[in-house]
C-alpha cells in the first residue's frame, strides 16, 4: 500500500464516521414532534384510556425488519389522586411466543400540562412523556438482560389513539444513537 493510499484510508474512516453522525443528527432533526399531533382526534387522555384491563399484541423487529419475537400483554391499570396530580399504576404481564413470561409495573405521575413521569424496576431513572391531541411520546432507558449481562437501551416510544378502544404503539430501540430495532403493539381496551 502506498503512502497516498494510507493517507486516504486514514482520512476516509474519520470522514465516514463524521458523515454518518451528521446524517444521523440531521435525520433526528427532521423527525416527528409531539406538537405535530396537537389537533388530532380522538383526544387522548391517558388516565381514561389506561384505566381497567387492556390487552396488547406485539412484535419486536430487528434492524432489518425481521420479526424476532412475538408477545401478548395483559395490563391492569388504576389511577388515584386529585386531577393534575394523579398517580397511575400500569401492571403489565408479558407472555412471549417462546413461552417465557415477564412483568413490568409502571408508576406514572401526571401534571396539569399533559406531561407525565414514570418509573419501573427495569427502567433507569425517570421516563418522561407528553400528550398532545391523540398522541403520547414517551422516552426512557430500559435495563435489558442479555447473555447474563444488563445493557441500557433507549426507547423513543410513540402511542396513537385510534378509537376509544384501540391504540397503536411504535417504539424505536437504540444504543449509542444507533437503531437496534422496533417494538410495535396494538392495545385493545376491554
Image (cartoon, rainbow, N blue to C red):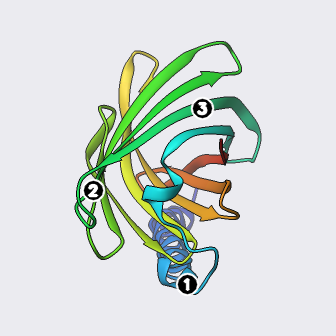
Crowd around label 1: few <14 · some 14–19 · many ≥20 (10 Å): few
User: Could you say whether the residue bearing mark 3 is in a helix, strand or loop?
Assistant: strand
From this viewpoint, is residue 144 visible? no
Which comes sooner in the sequence, label 2 or label 1?
A: 1
Residue 7 in the image: above or below residue 120: below
Q: Tell me what residue is drawn at x 48 percent, y 57 percent.
A: 48
**Residue 117: percent from left, percent from top:** 28, 57
Q: Is residue 36 left or right of residue 149?
A: right
Separation of marks 2 and 3 at Cα, in angstroms: 24 Å
- The disc label shown at residue 5, or none: none
Residue 140 lies left or right of residue 67; in this view the side is left
Distance between the alpha carbons at the discs numbered 3 and 1: 29 Å
Which circle marks residue 86 in the picture? 2
Labels 3 and 1: the sequence-earlier one: 1
Q: Residue at x 62, y 81 (%)?
A: 40
Query: Residue under circle 3?
Result: 73
- Quarter containing the N terminus: bottom right
Q: Residue furthest right?
A: 66
Give the residue number, with chain letter if any, for mark 1: 36
- Mark found first going from the N terminus, 2 or 3: 3
In the image, farthest residue toward the top: 99
Residue sitting nearer the eye, 189 or 113: 189
Q: Residue at x 40, y 58 (%)?
A: 139
State whether residue 168 appears in this view. Answer: yes
Amino acid at each position: 500500500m502506498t503512502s497516498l493510499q494510507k493517507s486516504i484510508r486514514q482520512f476516509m474512516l474519520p470522514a465516514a464516521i463524521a458523515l454518518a453522525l451528521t446524517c444521523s443528527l440531521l435525520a433526528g432533526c427532521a423527525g416527528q414532534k409531539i406538537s405535530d399531533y396537537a389537533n388530532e382526534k380522538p383526544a387522548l387522555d391517558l388516565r381514561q384510556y389506561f384505566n381497567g384491563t387492556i390487552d396488547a399484541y406485539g412484535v419486536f423487529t430487528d434492524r432489518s425488519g425481521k420479526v424476532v419475537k412475538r408477545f401478548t400483554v395483559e395490563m391492569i391499570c388504576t389511577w388515584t389522586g386529585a386531577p393534575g396530580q394523579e398517580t397511575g399504576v400500569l401492571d403489565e404481564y408479558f407472555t412471549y411466543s417462546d413461552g417465557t413470561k415477564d412483568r413490568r409495573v409502571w408508576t406514572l405521575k401526571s401534571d396539569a400540562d399533559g406531561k407525565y413521569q414514570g418509573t419501573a424496576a427495569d427502567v433507569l431513572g425517570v421516563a418522561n412523556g407528553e400528550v398532545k391531541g391523540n398522541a403520547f411520546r414517551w422516552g426512557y432507558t430500559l435495563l435489558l438482560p442479555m447473555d447474563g449481562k444488563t445493557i441500557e437501551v433507549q426507547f423513543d416510544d410513540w402511542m396513537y389513539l385510534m378509537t376509544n378502544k384501540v391504540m397503536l404503539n411504535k417504539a424505536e430501540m437504540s444504543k449509542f444513537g444507533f437503531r437496534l430495532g422496533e417494538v410495535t403493539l396494538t392495545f385493545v381496551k376491554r
